[in-house]
Image: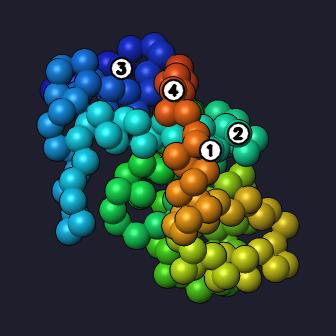
């Protein structure tokens, strides 16, 4: 089986937008110990994460680290990055500062979604690094307030099939 992606082609739309167009928006897309989320819910949450990135100055085709534990925030951040045209850099949130510093230097990521519990380690990794992403701490009342105030209406960036996504 071969696949010839159309132009433009954003993998966000392929994996999530197509489910909505198929009428599956009310179906569960994600299940975790604390609950579940529909495809429509993931779509809305990804828009809010994408809006946070755009409002913080991240542009399409720039790299964004997602260093969150598995769960709804990871999924929303992952799809939000893709939606706005960013390039996802998945990083284990439990890495040590020296290892994180290597990711900073290698990827030159513009921003990083990190959990509040790991934020100090990510800040420590910034010491002595030439390329330091702006940290977006996921969790806590302040983040929840900013996320809720962010518009979920973010258009899907018209990526080319050859553009990096992950």
| Furthest residue in direction top, as rendered | 7
User: Which residue occupies 49% across, 81% down?
Assistant: 94
Whether 59 is drawn above or below 67: the answer is above
Task: Report x, y in % for residue 122.
Answer: 66, 76
Residue 100's place in the image compared with 87, above or below, is below
- Label count reads 4
Marks 2 and 4, how far apart in space?
A: 13 Å
Determine the CA span between mark 3 and mark 1.
28 Å
Q: CA distance from mark 2 to mark 3?
A: 30 Å
Residue contact between numbered discs 2 and 3, judged by CB atoms under 8 Å? no
Q: On the image, numbered disc 1 is attached to which residue?
A: 52
Mark 3: secondary structure: loop
Q: Which residue is mark 2?
A: 55
**Residue 54's x, y, as percent?**
67, 37
Which mark identifies residue 153? 4
Mark 2 burial class by Cα count in 10 Å: few <14, some 14-19, many 20+: few
CB contact under 8 Å: marks 3 and 4: no
The mark nearer the N terminus, 4 or 1, is 1
Which image quadrant is residue 119 in? Answer: bottom right
Are discs 1 and 2 less than 8 Å apart at CB? yes
> Which class describes the residues within 10 Å of circle 1: few (<14), some (14-19), or many (20+)?
many
């Amino acid at each position: 089986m071969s696949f010839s992606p159309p132009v433009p082609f954003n993998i966000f739309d392929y994996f999530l937008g197509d489910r909505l167009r198929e009428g599956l928006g009310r179906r569960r897309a994600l299940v975790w110990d604390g609950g579940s989320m529909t495809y429509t819910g993931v779509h809305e949450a990804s828009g809010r994460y994408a809006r946070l990135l755009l409002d913080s100055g991240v542009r399409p085709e720039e790299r964004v680290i997602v260093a969150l534990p598995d769960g709804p925030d990871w999924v929303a951040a992952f799809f939000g990055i893709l939606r706005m045209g960013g390039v996802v850099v998945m990083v284990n949130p439990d890495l040590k500062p020296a290892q994180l510093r290597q990711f900073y230097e290698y990827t030159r990521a513009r921003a990083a979604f990190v959990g509040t519990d790991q934020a100090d380690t990510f800040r420590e990794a910034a010491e002595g690094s030439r390329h330091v992403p702006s940290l977006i701490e996921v969790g806590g009342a302040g983040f929840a307030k900013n996320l809720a105030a962010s518009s979920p209406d973010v258009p899907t960036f018209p990526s080319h099939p050859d553009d990096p996504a992950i």
